Image (tube, rainbow, N blue to C red):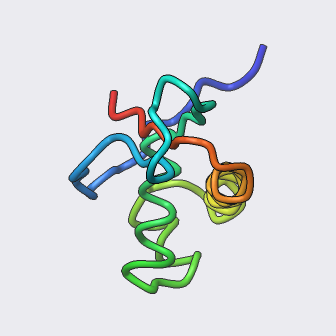
Amino acid sequence: MPRPCKNRKIRGKLNSNHFKPAGIPLSEIEEIELLMEEFEALRLTYVEDLPQEESSKRMEVSQPTFSRILKSAMKKVSDAIVHAKAIKINNS
């Protein structure tokens, strides 16, 4: 039985929960779901410009866990950009 998932501290606020390529209706493109913890990892690392060690402390997770979250977020965002997919941020 796996360990239960620890709650992550999320402080970033969303201005929108969808991003998509311009000129293509949302109903016509594939959508990728970005979790709030992935959104927060991107925000802390690339917007706040914090090192992973500090970012992981702010989210109250281990540095290896933070690194996995960030890698997952980057993979999803990169896939969406390269393949013209929509990004839905799950804020629940």
Relative horizontal placement of residue 23, taking residue 77 as reference (left or right): left
Please, is residue 5 above or below residue 62 in the view?
A: above
* Number of numbered callouts drawn: 0
Percent coordinates x, y for residue 70 in the rendering? 63, 60
Q: Residue at x 55, y 34 (%)?
A: 33
Residue at (46, 83) in percent of width and height: 50
Q: Quadrant of the C terminus?
A: top left
Residue 59 % position (x, y): 42, 57
Query: Which residue does the image show at 22% across and 54% down from the upper left?
Result: 13
Q: Is residue 67 left or right of residue 17?
A: right
What residue occupies the far front of the structure in this picture? Answer: 23
Task: From the viewer's perspective, tell me whether residue 62 is left or right of residue 50.
Answer: right
In the image, 79 versus 74, the foreground residue is 79
52 vs 75: above or below: below
Q: Which residue lies at the image location 38% right of the left edge and 41% below the top edge? A: 18
Could you say which is closer to the camera, residue 22 or residue 3?
Answer: 22
Determine whether, in the image, residue 45 is placed left or right of residue 89.
Answer: right
> x, y (%) of residue 44?
42, 71
Residue 68: image location, x then y, percent: 71, 54
Name the foreground residue: 54 vs 11: 11
Q: Residue furthest top?
A: 1
- Location of the N terminus by quadrant is top right
- Image position of 85 with respect to 55: above or below: above
Residue projecting furthest to the right: 1
Q: Give above or below for 62 relative to 47.
A: above
Of residues 24 and 7, the one nearer the viewer is 24
